[in-house]
């Protein structure tokens, strides 16, 4: 059985483990996140994962903008009744719960580009990795994704 450290190369949050917390906090604040100097571990990693995913920093948005986002995404019927923090919390939660049910409707070339984009973020050399989780979605995705996975990644095998 593979150890968790060798098996979690594909996780966004794992990439921030063991780094310089001060540097990560500074990067988050420079990106506009309202992150306290005393912010620790999980809070910093979640913020960095949002940055990695290219998600909007809601702390830098005005209250009317937040209300428009909530209305446009049908998250809350009366956003004016929520506090600013409540609006941000709902928007961030909705970001985390997003899905894309029509992925297979994309042309194969675009799906391959998505696989390449995701795998480009992996470490340059993988040591006894598990196959990426999206390869478990369906047989078609598995066939498409694994060919890209094996073409894009290099592996180190210790005997």
Image (cartoon, helix red, strand yellow):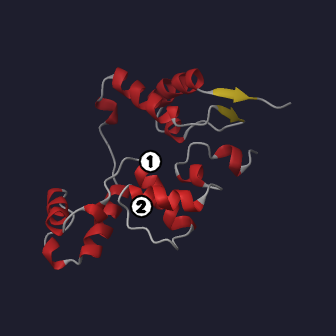
Looking at the image, residue 15 lies above or below residue 22: above
Apparent side of residue 22 relative to residue 53 in the rendered image (left or right): right
Total numbered labels placed on residues in the image: 2
Apparent side of residue 157 relative to residue 120 in the rendered image (left or right): right
The label on residue 60 is: none
Query: Which residue sits furthest right?
Result: 159
Looking at the image, residue 3 lies above or below residue 70: above
Looking at the image, residue 84 lies above or below residue 116: below
| Residue 36 drawn at (x, y percent) | 45, 72
Residue name at image x 34 percent, y 62 percent: 92
Quadrant housing residue 94: bottom left
Q: Nearer the viewer, mark 2 or mark 1?
A: 2
* Towards the viewer: 65 or 27: 27
Report if the CB atoms under discs 2 and 1 are less than 8 Å apart: no
Residue name at image x 46 percent, y 53 percent: 49
- Quadrant where the N terminus is found in the figure: top right
Apparent side of residue 73 relative to residue 130 in the rendered image (left or right): left
| Residue 147 drawn at (x, y percent) | 54, 22
* Towards the viewer: 74 or 63: 63
* Towards the viewer: 71 or 48: 48
Mark positioned earlier in the residue sequence (2 or 1):
2
* Towards the viewer: 41 or 111: 41
| Residue 82 drawn at (x, y percent) | 21, 77
Q: Residues within 10 Å of mark 1 (few under 14, many from 20)?
A: few
Kindly state the secondary structure of the residue where label 2 is placed.
Answer: helix
Residue under label 1, please give it: 52
Residue name at image x 60 percent, y 27 percent: 153
Quadrant housing residue 104: top left
Q: CA distance from mark 2 to mark 1?
A: 14 Å
Residue under label 2, please give it: 29
| Residue 140 drawn at (x, y percent) | 45, 27
Q: Residues within 10 Å of mark 2 (few under 14, many from 20)?
A: some
């Amino acid at each position: 059985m593979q150890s968790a450290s060798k098996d979690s190369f594909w996780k966004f949050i794992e990439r921030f483990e063991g780094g310089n917390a001060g540097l990560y906090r500074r990067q988050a604040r420079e990106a506009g996140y309202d992150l306290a100097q005393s912010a620790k571990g999980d809070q910093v990693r979640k913020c960095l994962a949002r940055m990695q995913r290219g998600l909007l920093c809601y702390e830098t948005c005005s209250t009317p903008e937040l209300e428009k986002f909530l209305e446009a995404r049908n998250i809350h019927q009366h956003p004016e009744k929520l506090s600013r923090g409540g609006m941000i919390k709902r928007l961030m939660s909705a970001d985390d719960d997003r899905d894309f049910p029509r992925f297979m409707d994309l042309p194969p070339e675009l799906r391959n580009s998505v696989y390449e984009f995701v795998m480009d973020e992996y470490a340059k050399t993988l040591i006894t990795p598990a196959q990426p989780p999206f390869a478990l979605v369906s047989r078609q995705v598995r066939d498409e994704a694994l060919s890209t996975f094996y073409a894009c990644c290099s592996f180190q095998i210790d005997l």
